[in-house]
Amino acid sequence: MKHLVWLCLVCLLLVSCVDEQPEEEVQVDDTGESDDQEEQDHDEEQDSEEEPDQSEDEGEQVEEEEKDEPVTSLISVDQARSIAERKLYFAINTMQNLQEEKQEWFGVEEESEAYTNAVEETKSELGENISSETIDQWAENYFQEFFIYNHLYRVLQPSDLNTRFDLKEFSDQHFVLAFIQLGDGAYKETTEYDVEFVKEDGEWKFKDYKHMPVDEPLDLTFEDLQEAFVDVESLERIEGELVEEKTHEGEHYLVIDYEGMTKAINTNTGFENFDLVE
């Protein structure tokens, strides 16, 4: 009987040990999962803390790059071209008004007193559009071309500003506008100009220009020629429409209609061929 009781007690102890073992394993597993979860949460928190730092670094880098980036222009090419066209237009308009008012100036002898007085008055009239640094030279140039020679050879007109515009130099007080004047094959050659303007008393004024003939093929595209001409009254660019492309005597031409005015332009020389226009 005693042996039976001891046997029962031993069995109960064994069963109790077996029942408790899984609970310990589960407890160990739960603890392991909890530790892993805590490590994962910690890593995520660390990553989330690091990401804003990276974003801030990138923001600081972009800001530094923006600060270091040089200013490319204080005015756009179109604005510079518009200033040039307007100032040249006003100067020519001034001279045309003088032609109407000063008939006695036509044909005066150079180096005479009348000539000197006329140039001085011309200088005064052009002062709003031409720099004081070069007004002596250019007042005489304008006077000669409007009253002596009766042609515009040295004086630029808005219609001379045709294509390939570029700003070569610029500041808040000075800019140099480069462009190509298309030739006609007769009276003028295709020419590259660098025209300088300076600001005096808050106003842009023409100062001078340099020019050189274009000897290399231009390889002009329709985009180069689409707005190559200007309405001399409104100073608005005339938008051309491509009519066709032609080859004549081995030369390539673009035939373009400019609001009823059709031109056939050699893409290498910039010359207009009147014979190719019907």
Image: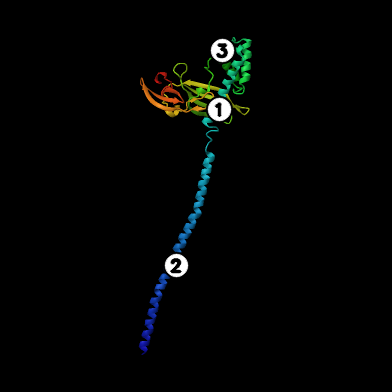
Q: Which amino acid, by three-letter code, is at mark 2?
A: Thr
Disc 2: CA contacts within 10 A as few (<14), some (14-19) or many (>=20)? few
First in sequence: mark 2 or mark 1?
2
Q: Position of residue 8 (x, y in %)?
A: 37, 84
| CA–CA distance in space, label 2 to label 1 | 80 Å
Tag 2 residue: 31
Relative to the observer, which residue lies in front, 209 or 58? 209
**Residue 5 position within the rendered picture, expressed as x and y whole percent measured from the top left:** 37, 87
- The C terminus is located in which quarter? top left
**Placement of 23 over or under 7, stated as above or below:** above
Residue 157 located left or right of residue 17? right
The residue located at (49%, 55%) in the rendering is: 48
Asked if the residue under mark 3 is in contact with the one under mark 2, i.e. CB atoms within 8 Å, the reply is no
Q: Earlier in the sequence, mark 3 or mark 1?
A: 1
The amino acid type of the residue labelled 3 equals Ile
Numbered badge on residue 83: 1
Amino acid beneath label 1: Ile
